[in-house]
Amino acid sequence: MGKTLAEKVWDEHVVRSVDGEPDLLFIDLHLIHEVTSPQAFDGLRLAGRPVRRPDLTLATEDHNVPTVDWDKPIADPVSRTQVETLRTNCEEFGVRLHPLGDVEQGIVHVVGPQLGLTQPGMTIVCGDSHTATHGAFGAIAFGIGTSEVEHVLATQTLPQARPRTMSVTVDGDLPEGVTAKDLILYLITQTGTGGGQGYIVEYRGDAIRALSMEGRMTVCNMSIEWGAKAGMIAPDETTFAYLEDRPEAPKGAEWDAALEHWRSLATDDDAVFDKEIAIDAADVTPWVTWGTNPGQGAPLGGTIPAPGDFDEEIDRVAAENALRYMALDAGTPLRDVHVDTVFVGSCTNGRLEDLRLAAEVIKGHKVADGTRMLVVPGSARVRLEAEAEGLDLVFKEAGAEWRGAGCSMCLGMNPDTLSPGERSASTSNRNFEGRQGKGGRTHLVSVPVAAATAVRGTLSSPADLRPVAAR
Amino acid sequence: MEKFTTHTGVGVPLRRSDVDTDQIIPAEYLKRVTRTGFEDGLFAAWRNDPSFVLNRPAYDAGTVLVAGPNFGTGSSREHAVWALQNYGFRVVISPRFGDIFRGNSGKAGLLTARVDDKVVLRLWEHLEAEPGATVTVDLEARTVRAGEGHDAIEDSFDIDDYTRWRLLEGLDDIGITLSHDDDIAAFESSRPSWKPATLHAG
Ligand code: SF4
């Protein structure tokens, strides 16, 4: 019997396999950041252990860093301590770090792919649940806890029980103006936030193949939001074209050898998944969330649902609580919902392609009165590349704030937060209560919807905007 | 992790049951970036009370905590174990432990010895009658001992075989993995040269 992509990559990394014990997996790349690593390094220090493979480890500063005045000392003492601790730990243990101010600094899941370190067929871990992003390249990538971070630092391996496999096949074409973000939000609404529990998911089908690498990363990024252990997409010509000539991609004969291997990773025709789901790309429309988990979503053209619309008691209660927290009335058209803050950024939608798309929509328009728009590049390099194309000017002319790189308002660990009761349209991945600031209300949206919403001040798509007069 | 075979130290009678991990260390003490220094937060809510057992000089050198049933229930915070260890405890004796706490303790090298309710009662009486008295916990023989003569307390305790083996050998999870170092090294030597690296020679 053939193997799935996930099984091939898994099997290639088993160091030791014994009945009744989890497999011991070798880890090809360990990404670290300031929030989940300090106790892990401290554990090494207490036990007198070195980092086994600093050459397979990369650190960056992202969760806590300010997006303004990033050349000055960090004002918040807790954030500053975490960042400074990362710096001393990396220095002491010989780990490569891209600190604030470095051109490769940025959100850890933007930095890995951009450097070409994220490659097909790898195992990649990070003390962060959105590590699944890297699965877009055909890698097994998942988030781990601090004890596991220490385990990987010390041994470059991790004991892991073999997960089940699931395929999500998306056939057909996404309609015009519908993005990868809409697709994944739609999928999570269909499956619920626990639908992927315990699975490594492989996204397949024409609509997935048609996505850019950036779009594929957006889809894999949110795998965790429907409970999956990891999300993957088989590498193909799109993947190879993205990787070729990246700083850390193999070169010359090494590239040829790597390519030959990467081409062998696709799921075999006779491989069997433990579970299969199929969706039709044509059914996907611009999708927004109305509730407090990513599965509480609806088409932008629709209305806020009523708790009674749900069959299950548990969903009715969840909807009731969510509507109360979000201060929304059932039956209100989503397009009528006023938004105070638009956030474009995060490891879901903070890459150059996302910023181009946002700029394209907003060009020639102004951010609505009573609404603010924050544009936060996923990495310092994304920021520089966007500035080289003049995207920063487009945003500034429209009245948006152009910021430095980091996680920013995705989780509000830095000063970029919502105030209580403030409502956002956000291109990030979590709309949990208080995620973007205590009492903040989050609607997850795609990049074009975010940009159009900034212009109209209510949830909108680019189709709702008046054409910009020819100049 | 240090090997644990047998330990003799000052016993501290904590006459409370259902001590959850929030009581062991409240959330406000969790902001540190180290695995050390959590002793300040240990039982923080009770430490202001001068009559609290840890505030009594006789128990200053305490290393064996004797607590009531359901010790370490609640939140999964690993900090609860670190706080006890940072303070100096090597062993907690209780009739019942929270599952996650027990797992975390085993990983970090804190021995959780499960004994009969009546053993805890007798230990409490003994340690209160003679503040500063020691308790011996023998992991090889799985026994706790305290006192002398005909009042001596000696009883067995429960611990699962796997955790006992790991503590006796001084192996944490990482230690166990490192005992397969040959397998890891063999795997490393077979990795293709085109796999990426973050550091480059020269
Ligand atoms: S951008 Fe948001 S989701 Fe992504 S790593 Fe940062 S905090 Fe986590």
Image (cartoon, coloured by chain):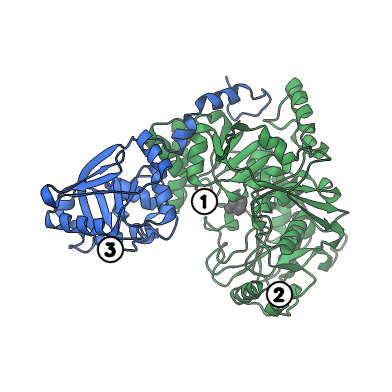
Determine the residue positioned at 84% across, 40% down.
A269
Residues at marks 3 and 2, common chain? no
Query: x, y (%) of residue B170?
Result: 37, 35
Give me the chain letter of mark 3: B
Dot label at residue A329 = none
**Could you say which chain is coloured green in the image?**
A
Q: How many marks?
A: 3
Q: Is the residue indicated by label 3 positioned so its CB lies within 8 Å of ligand 1?
A: no
Q: Secondary structure at mark 3?
A: loop
* Dot 3 amino acid type: Arg
What's the colour of chain B in the image? blue
Q: CA distance from mark 2 to mark 1?
A: 39 Å
Q: Secondary structure at mark 1?
A: loop
Q: Which residue is mark 1?
A: A64
Residues at marks 1 and 3, common chain? no
* Dot 1 amino acid type: Asn
Residue A138 visible in the current orientation:
no
Nearer the viewer's eye, disc 1 or disc 3? 3
Depth order, front residue of B71/B31: B71
Query: x, y (%) of residue A63?
Result: 54, 50
- Where residue A280 sits, quadrant-wise, is bottom right
Q: Quadrant of the C terminus of chain A?
A: bottom right
- Where residue B25 sits, quadrant-wise, is bottom left
Q: Which residue is mark 2?
A: A310
Give me the chain letter of mark 1: A
Determine the residue positioned at 82% across, 68% down.
A464
